[in-house]
Amino acid sequence: MIMLATSFVLGACGNQLNSSLRGSEERVAIRLSVKESEHLRQGMQRYLASVQGIVEALHHNKRVAVSESAKNGGVGMLSGVPASVAVRLPPEFLMLSMDTHQKFDALSRSAAAGESKSQMLKQLGDILANCTACHAKYKLTPN
């Protein structure tokens, strides 16, 4: 089951990977202080923990756990973002970030509503496509 989920998610992101990962010189540099960069990295780690929880819960058919894990990456996560970080981020980055949080919340609602595994895996693939697009377009650099 894990292999199937991984294949589905990688398939959803595969085309974007091939076309968008061309090298760091083409990525937009985001210049933040060490503390601000760390805050952003912690958010990305929280995304990864959410994805891991979602995949594990899907494997065990635990919809409540899928919903909870997805919600951990949702819009509620933004409450701790310092204004100093938000104002220094490119608008497109902020829009992609918001879309990703909203996609996590939508997946949480889908799991709670009893959507199929296939539908939830599609939503997870869409979330990971956002992650791939963001990492392909942006890089953190020291301020």
Image (spheres, rainbow, N blue to C red):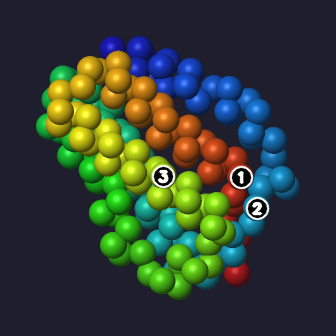
Near-viewer residue (30 or 52): 30
The answer to whether 18 appears left or right of 135 in the picture is: right
Q: Is residue 23 shown left or right of residue 41?
A: right
Locate the N terminus and report the quarter of the image it occupies.
top left
Q: Amino acid at mark 1?
A: Lys
Frontmost of labels 1 and 3 is 3
Q: Is residue 17 above or below residue 108?
A: above
* Residue at the disc numbered 2: 28
Classify mark 1: helix, strand or loop: helix
C-beta proximity under 8 Å, tags 2 and 1 = yes
* Mark 2 vs mark 3, CA separation in Å: 19 Å
Give the mark nearest the N terminus, 2 or 3.
2
Q: Which residue lies under the disc numbered 1?
A: 137
Q: Earlier in the sequence, mark 2 or mark 1?
A: 2
**On-image quarter of the C terminus:** bottom right
Residue extending farthest to the bottom is: 84
Residue 99, numbered label? 3
Identify the image quadrant of residue 119: top left
N-terminal label among 1 and 3: 3
Q: Under tag 2, what secondary structure?
A: strand
Residue 56, located in which quarter of the rendered image? top left
Q: Is residue 66 visible?
A: no
